[in-house]
Image (cartoon, rainbow, N blue to C red):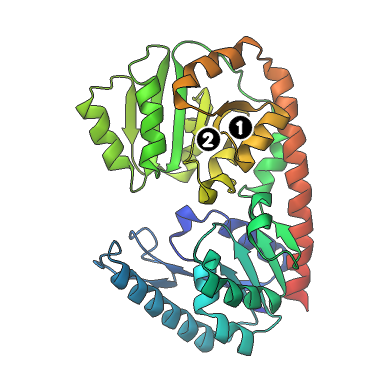
Amino acid sequence: MKAAIIILGNTWVCPYVNTYKHILDKKGCAYDVILWDRDGSDADAKFAFSAENANLDNPLVKAACYVRYARFIRRVIRENKYDRLVISGPHLAILLSSFLRKGYKGRYLVDYRDISIEQKPFLYGIYSKVLADSYCNVISSPGFRKYLPGKYEYLLSHNFDIEKAVNSLVAEMPAFEPDVPLKVLTIGAIRNFESNVRVLENLGNNDAYRLSFVGRGEASGRLKEYALLHNVRNVEFAGYYKKEDEVAIVNECSFINIVFPNDIKHSAIMSNRFYLALVHKKPVLVTAGSTQAALVEKYALGVVVSDCKEIDAGIRKYLSEFDYCEFCKRCNSLLSVFIEDYNALERAVGEFVRE
């Protein structure tokens, strides 16, 4: 039995790949990862598609690159004769729909992480047919269920390292000291300029806070320019970081910023930062009305932000009632739910590669 895990970008922005790798390793199933190396970080990968120097801001160029990548995927699959496929994202599922349904019916798994092109009326039906012919369908957030065809069952796959999640249930956490300045960390892919700049506007040059943006993404340069233009003194920017340094970076912060745009695409997701915060026991800042906000409110895991002008007041109110020991217990309660979801996923993927 041999499987292929197929993703639409680099591995560093697709940490869920490790979930499938962990399960397949455990089940003794050989596998390859097929990816689109967009930034050069996976140039040495065995099966890496590259569209170097292509202007992906141009819709026509981007569409052509997607078609080329789909052709690359089909060629690699044919040459390696995989028994099972894990297809990540609606773009790939739709582009490969005919290939999948004719040659791999019941032998592919569809993994869904973002609301995207499948919501367009002329593509929704195609995507629904891909879901119908898959072995099983996996989503990364319960918030997606209301946007996808309701006649299918969806398993949940959370963006965490299962071993770290399980260990964190019993690990002794570093003491949380809400000392001034409070360190507000934005880590990972730095996207969403508008929502992040609102955080900068309202916490910038406030001596009670130290803001850090650690990672890279399309918004990082603009945010840095904004900070320089407005002489924001209490912010620092660090680019790419090594994965092994992530724990130390997170442990130094007071809050993790997950303030996203207030739109359909962002309101339904579960971000990588949310899981980092749970595992490392850090309170979060999240946008009101989102799937993440509902969990934060239920388990009292941080500050729900309706208006960025109220962030400072919300943080101060939250800390005035804060009990770190009780907070850690609430983190573990939610993590335990997520671990059960993982166990169900592992059982399903195990059956998928055993049949």
Q: CA distance from mark 2 to mark 1?
A: 8 Å
Residue at 40 percent across and 62 percent down: it is 42
Q: Upstream in the sequence, badge 2 or badge 1?
A: 2
Task: Work out whether 69 lies above or below 225.
Answer: below
Q: In this rendering, does residue 261 appear at all? A: yes
Residue at 49 percent across and 27 percent down: it is 307
Residue 225: image quadrant is top left
Residue 197: image quadrant is top left
Residue 247, given in percent of the width and then of the height, sits at 53, 35
Task: Work out whether 245 lies above or below 79.
Answer: above
- Name the residue carrying label 1: 280
Task: Work out whether 201 lies above or below 287.
Answer: above
Residue 241: image quadrant is top left
Residue 114, given in percent of the width and then of the height, sits at 54, 57
Residue 17, given in percent of the width and then of the height, sits at 57, 60
Contact between marks 2 and 1 (CB within 8 A): the answer is yes
Q: Amino acid at mark 1?
A: His
- Name the residue carrying label 2: 247
Residue at 23 percent across and 22 percent down: it is 231
